[in-house]
Image (cartoon, grey):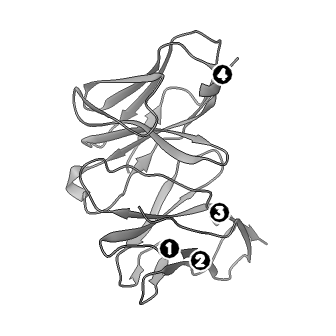
Amino acid sequence: DVKVTQSSRYLVKRTGEKVFLECVQDMDHENMFWYRQDPGLGLRLIYFSYDVKMKEKGDIPEGYSVSREKKERFSLILESASTNQTSMYLCATKSEQFSLGYEQYFGPGTRLTVT
Amino acid sequence: DAKTTQPTSMDCAEGRAANLPCNHSTISGNEYVYWYRQIHSQGPQYIIHGLKNNETNEMASLIITEDRKSSTLILPHATLRDTAVYYCIVRVFSNAGNMLTFGGGTRLMVKP
């Protein structure tokens, strides 16, 4: 079974704090993605990575950075958390071998609250 | 990318077929129709996708109209566990940035 895990299910941070969200997958997938999901706005892509040390901006990269030092791990970093970054954060992975479809596998999500 | 329109919510009796419609009238010839669902407090789950032929897998069937302007996801025997938000997405197949963007989706409530 495909498994994608995220470091925390719920997180509360203060404005200005540096926040790390980690995602780990055990499927040896090349592609990894970070999304945020907000009511009324659906799912929006923040960053994605198609290989170790490679990263590409998604639709809403401002205020975020990412790190992919190992194939199985993709980290999302909020350099200085702000209240408008309160959201559900979802990590996803996809194998290049199945690139015909958008069969992305999602983690359980991290609900981040910035106060 | 073609925009999709789905009803906000639907109810279905347990054991009956759930038919979830999606309109994508501006779909272009190289765009696929994908369906995902998201059960409360979980990440989205891939269900099925198709280009123009009807598709079936162990989870659901996808019926795409001949003009490809609409499609219907069918859960043949809905269970309580199928209660979720169902998202219809239309995207071009591309290796560059295989990203997903979800709209509002349809909240399916399966009732006993």
**Secondary structure state at the residue bearing disc 1:** loop
Viewer-side residue, A7 vs A77: A77
Q: For marks 2 and 3, give the CA distance.
A: 20 Å
Instruction: Give the residue drawn at x 63%, y 12%.
Output: A15
Viewer-side residue, A37 vs A32: A37
Q: Which mark is residue B81?
A: 3
Residue type at mark 4 is Thr
Is the residue at mark 1 from the same chain as the one at mark 2? yes
Image: A112 above or below B41: above
The mark closer to the camera, 2 or 3, is 2
Q: For marks 1 and 2, give the CA distance.
A: 10 Å
Examine the image and state in which quarter residue B28 appears.
bottom left
The mark closer to the camera, 3 or 4, is 4
The mark closer to the camera, 1 or 2, is 1
Residue hosting label 1 = B24
Q: Which mark is residue A104?
A: none
The mark closer to the camera, 3 or 1, is 1
Q: For marks 4 and 2, give the CA distance.
A: 36 Å
**Secondary structure state at the residue bearing disc 2:** strand
Instruction: Give the residue drawn at x 53%, y 67%.
Output: B4
Which quarter shows the C terminus of chain A? top right
Q: Are marks 1 and 4 in contact (CB under 8 Å)?
A: no
Sequence-wise, the earlier of marks 3 and 1 is 1
Residue hosting label 4 = A83
Residue hosting label 2 = B21
Mark 3, Cα crowd under 10 Å, few <14 / some 14-19 / many 20+, is few
Residue type at mark 3 is Arg
**Secondary structure state at the residue bearing disc 4:** helix
Question: Where does the image place residue A58, in percent across and percent down from the top left?
Answer: 39, 38
Instruction: Give the residue drawn at x 49%, y 71%.
Output: B59
